[in-house]
Structures are given as C-alpha cells and as structure tokens.
Image (cartoon, rainbow, N blue to C red):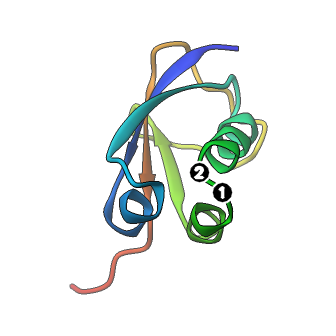
Amino acid sequence: MSTVHVRFFAGAAEAAGTQSEQLTASTAGELRAAIVAAHGAELERVLERCTLLADGVRLDSPSAPIEAGATVDVLPPFAGG
C-alpha cells in the first residue's frame, strides 16, 4: 500500500473534521475504506455521493489504482451554475 495525500472539500471536509490528511491505499476502494475507518458513518454517507480525483484523474471504479504520493481530492456534488 502507498501513502496518499487526501484533500476534503465542502461537506466532505465538514464530515471529516479536517481539510486534509495522509492515508494509506493502493486503489480507490481501499482509500474509501480507509476514509470510513478513520472518520465513521457520517463521512461514509457523504462519501457515497463524492467523486475521487487522483492528481486530477477521476477514479471511476474501486479497483482504480492510486500511485504512491498522489493527491486525491474528495469532491461532493456542487450545486449552482
């Protein structure tokens, strides 16, 4: 597993209680599990609606790889236009 820098935005940051942290994961699925393990059910509910971007690339499946040292943005849906 690799260490990645995770940045939380908007409602995800509120639920996590932080704007960023370091976690260990090699895939999007592992990262989602690590986030839930670190922050619990409230963030899990928010995370279900979030998009993950690793260095600007959308992680579309749980098996999507994440490179060591990547920055992963956790983005909830945004409203407006």
Residues packed near mark 2 inside 10 Å, few (<14), some (14 to 19) or many (20 plus)? some
Height in image: 53 above or below 45? above
Height in image: 28 above or below 52? above
Q: Is residue 34 left or right of residue 59?
A: right
Q: Secondary structure at mark 1?
A: loop
Determine the image quadrant of residue 42: bottom right
* CB within 8 Å, label 2 to label 1: yes
Name the image quarter holding the N terminus: top right
Residue to which mark 1 is pinned: 40
The residue lying toward the viewer, choosing from 8 and 50, is 8
User: x and y percent of residue 40 in the render?
Assistant: 66, 57
Residues packed near mark 1 inside 10 Å, few (<14), some (14 to 19) or many (20 plus)? some
Height in image: 14 above or below 17? below
Which dot marks residue 1? none
Give the alpha-carbon distance from disc 2 to disc 1, as whole Å. 4 Å
Height in image: 12 above or below 78? above
As shown in the figure, which amino acid type bears the numbered disc 2? His
User: x and y percent of residue 24 in the render?
Assistant: 62, 22
User: x and y percent of residue 29 in the render?
Assistant: 74, 41
User: x and y percent of residue 9 in the render?
Assistant: 33, 57
Q: Is residue 19 left or right of residue 12?
A: left
The residue lying toward the viewer, choosing from 18 and 1, is 18
Residue at 59 percent of width and 51 percent of height: 39
Residue to which mark 2 is pinned: 39
As shown in the figure, which amino acid type bears the numbered disc 1? Gly
Residue at 78 percent of width and 36 percent of height: 63
Residue at 32 percent of width and 46 percent of height: 19
